[in-house]
Amino acid sequence: MEKSFFKLPLIGCLIYFLLSILLNIFSLYLHADELFLGSFTWNVFFDVPFSSLLRFFFEHYFIDSLLVFGLLTLLFHSAHVYVVNKVNITLLIIIMSIYCIVAYFITINTNVYLKIESPLFLIFFNIAFATIRYLLEALLLYYLIEFSKSYFVKSQNKFLLTEKNYSQIHYIVFSTFSCFILLKGYILESNAFTALFSGTLHNYLATIYLFAVLLGLIMSKRNFTIFSDKIGYGKLVKSISISSILILSVIFIVFSFIDNNPSKYYIDSFISVFNNINKLLLVILLISLICLTINKTTKYYFGKAVFRKSQN
């Protein structure tokens, strides 16, 4: 029997991704007018720019799949389920099918659209309802795994954490949850500044932000140097929470700054970013702050020197 720490959660994540798309397509068929059903479906999926379609799948399916992957990784580790075989995959398909259906109803009942002019209050409400939604979905997945863990095929040998895989596991888990929170938080904040994000400005800022987050996570890999025989749940929660709050706070300040100075900081084309030294410095500062925040946080919680000091 093949045993792996991430393979079974990755399979579950892919199952969730595909089932979510199929479920939403089925929902479109149910809610579309029967007389215009064919043209409606064609317009939604084929008569739109490829970039818009790619962005739609990225924001609505890929980002949520990161959360599912991270949760499955921790839940399967707690249940000591690592074996990849037909029984476990079949059971995982059943679990993810139930999860997708219930999560769909949670989503449509927590999507609340408020007409509020203040971006600050709109962000607060968006984050509040998003937090409720994802907490309910996390609890749902937890109980599904908890009630069915006795049916999974488990390995007789316990999964051993070594100095090498311990660092890799923590880095992957940290990156997964950080990407989910940072990307989802960016989307919620950008949605609050609807007047600001028009034309090409949204694409430029989103690209710069995504690049900064990925660069920061790649650079932080060298900071995962400690070793223990248990998963550091507390360190993961603290490091992810602190870095995410700081970065999203900086993003809100940047959005507010640009929103209050639209004529000065509006970007008409990508070349203008490099022609204007003020915009270029703003981009460099934003990337530097995101990378610095992620690196300092991971080094503090997962750096070997700090870990040894805490042990003395």
Image: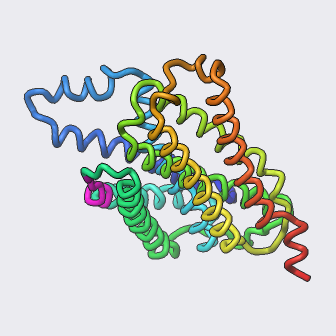
In the rendered image, the vertical position of residue 294 relative to residue 263, given as above or below: below
Asked if residue 275 lies in the magenta stretch, the reply is: no
**Visible in this render: residue 98?**
no
* Position in image of residue 201 (x %, y %): 48, 28
Q: Which residues are magenta?
A: 106-114
Horizontally, residue 258 falls left or right of residue 35, namely right
For the point 64% across and 36% down, the residue is: 282
Number of residue marks: 0
Residue 264 vs residue 196, the one in the foreground: 264
* Quadrant assignment for the N terminus: bottom right
Extreme left residue here?
A: 35
Extreme bottom residue here?
A: 312
The answer to which image quadrant residue 73 occupies is bottom right
For the point 15% across and 36% down, the residue is: 32
* Position in image of residue 81 (x %, y %): 61, 67
In the rendered image, the vertical position of residue 288 relative to residue 148, given as above or below: above
* Quadrant assignment for the C terminus: bottom right
* Position in image of residue 6 (x %, y %): 65, 55
Asked if residue 112 lies in the magenta stretch, the reply is: yes
* Position in image of residue 218 (x %, y %): 74, 44
For the point 63% across and 22% down, the residue is: 276
The answer to which image quadrant residue 144 occupies is bottom left
Horizontally, residue 81 falls left or right of residue 143, namely right
Residue 27 vs residue 127, the one in the foreground: 127
For the point 47% across and 71% down, the residue is: 142
Horizontally, residue 41 falls left or right of residue 294, namely left
